[in-house]
Amino acid sequence: MTSAVSAPASVSASPATGLVCRACGAEYPLIAQHACYECFGPLEVAYDQAALARVTREQIEAGPQNIWRYAGLLPAGQDPATRVTLDPGLTPLVSAPALAAAVGLRAPLWVKDDSANPTHSFKDRVVSVALTAARSLGFTRFACASTGNLANSVAAHAARAGVPSIVFIPSDLEQGKIITTAVYGGDLVAIEGSYDDVNRLCGELVETDEFEDTAFVNVNVRPFYAEGSKTLGYEVAEQLGWRIPAQVVIPMASGELLTKVDKAFSELVEAGLVEAPEGGWKVFGAQSAGCNPIATALQAGTDEIVPVKPTGIAKSLNIGDPAAGAYAIEAVRRTGGWMDFADDEEIRAGIRLLAETTGVFAETAGGTTVAVLKKLVESGKLDPAKETVVYNTGEGLKTIDAVAEQVGPTHRIKPSLRGAREAGLLG
Ligand SMILES: *Cc1c(COP(=O)(O)O)cnc(C)c1O
Ligand SMILES: [Zn+2]
């Protein structure tokens, strides 16, 4: 599988020029390969900067109401007919003054609510880009190693495209993520181990002849997958009226999403689509106390990430050996941000606080991010006087057990006015 991603001559070509090693700079064509042959470093998509600079706000604004309005800044999918997609994106940017007041922010606060995507998490963005590239590269089966949301999204995309799928998950995943994957059909393999075990096995399977036809979105086509996360940066800037916010708070599993939102802001500035905010932007990362190898390394002042065995309720963030951790640390240090983590009780409180102040019901990852936002304000790491965007990446209905024992009816009454009166509802 080494043919390049290509588009018919009638549509504008991909601005991507190849893959480049993030560690040593070695260059490769646009192939299904995620690690450098020279140094085993991760590969990333490289672009023709002049092609990116030709993209205009007007072109984007005239585009479809989904991530493909940014096709001129993505590695694949320029020709609509080539897309493998549920058309995710353009999710609400919710003004959150009550949440701002509750956590002690004096400047505008926004929640980028990516639970509004077709399979209810931000993973639809990365899967659409990865599978579009994968089909152009000739793959005929779609797969992934998942902490839950990716499984939903790959199975749903495969169903829409009529392509077989095989999805690998840890067997102890939430019911709400197993059922919402299985319902789309396709093979679903529950592995008796952690996500890191699942990922390692997928890395071995992808090398076998039997899986030669299979694109693992976060293994062999990972460089394309990662680029889909950039749309969460582009969209926030466009929704703010082509401005970059001063501060963003982002949940981290592998750390990839965080690095790509930062990359998206840089690209927008370099392409002349927005001006950098005064003093630049600061990127903040959120993990759970049960799985905090990136935040721990940053706080200790090193880039040396010590893998952990994940525990705790934020399962979608439970990657103990995070592939992009060092790059997330680099982005946070370079921009002057910080990272912190929240324990299970703080995560539950974060879910409820977000719900009660904004009407957005987040999964545990969103609760983690809100809990960390609160800590960052309390510790003075986040400037309470600067505009902030907090990312909710997933839907609360998928992890309903997290708060099931904490909330319920506030009254229980007989079906009569007397019953209502006895409960104090009539004064
Ligand atoms: C996968 C996931 C993330 C983080 O993704 P990375 O790019 O691996 O850091 C955040 N939130 C949710 C809900 C996810 O499913
Ligand atoms: Zn290299």
Image (cartoon, rainbow, N blue to C red):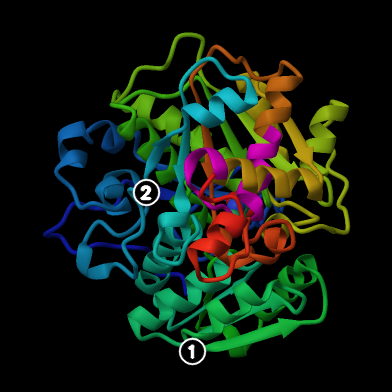
Decide: few, some or many residues near mark 1? Use Cα within 10 Å; few <14, some 14-19, many ≥20.
some
Residue 409 seen in the figure: yes
Residue 29 location (% of width, % of height): 45, 56
**Residue in the image at 45% along x and 28% along y:** 266
Residue at the spot of label 2 = 91
Secondary structure under the numbered disc 2 in the rendered image = loop
Question: The C terminus appears in which quarter of the rendering?
Answer: top right
In the displayed structure, would residue 373 be above or below residue 415?
above
Q: Relative to residue 297, is residue 388 depicted above or below?
A: above
Q: In this orientation, which residue lies closer to the viewer: 337 or 104?
A: 104
The three-letter amino acid code for the residue at tag 1 is: Gly
Q: Dot 2, how many residues are within 10 Å of its Cα: few (below 14), some (14-19), or many (20+)?
A: many
Magenta span dominant secondary structure: helix
Residue 185 badge: 1
Does the magenta run of residues contain 219?
no
Q: Nearer the viewer, residue 204 or 367?
A: 367
Which residue is at a point 40% across and 71% down the rendered structure image? 137
* Image quarter of residue 330: top right
Q: How far apart are marks 1 and 2 (CA)?
A: 26 Å
Residue 222 appears in the picture as rendered: no
Give the extent of the magenta segment: 356-372
Sequence-first tag of 1 and 2? 2
Q: Look at 65% across and 23% down and name the residue there.
A: 337
Specify the amino acid type for callout 2: Thr
Give x and y (percent) for residue 114. Answer: 46, 51
Magenta stretch encompasses residue 359 = yes
Q: Ligand 1 closer than 8 Å to the CB at disc 2? A: no
In the image: residue 101, left or right of residue 160: right
Percent x, y for residue 58? Answer: 15, 34
Instruction: Name which residue lies at 70% across and 18% down.
Output: 381
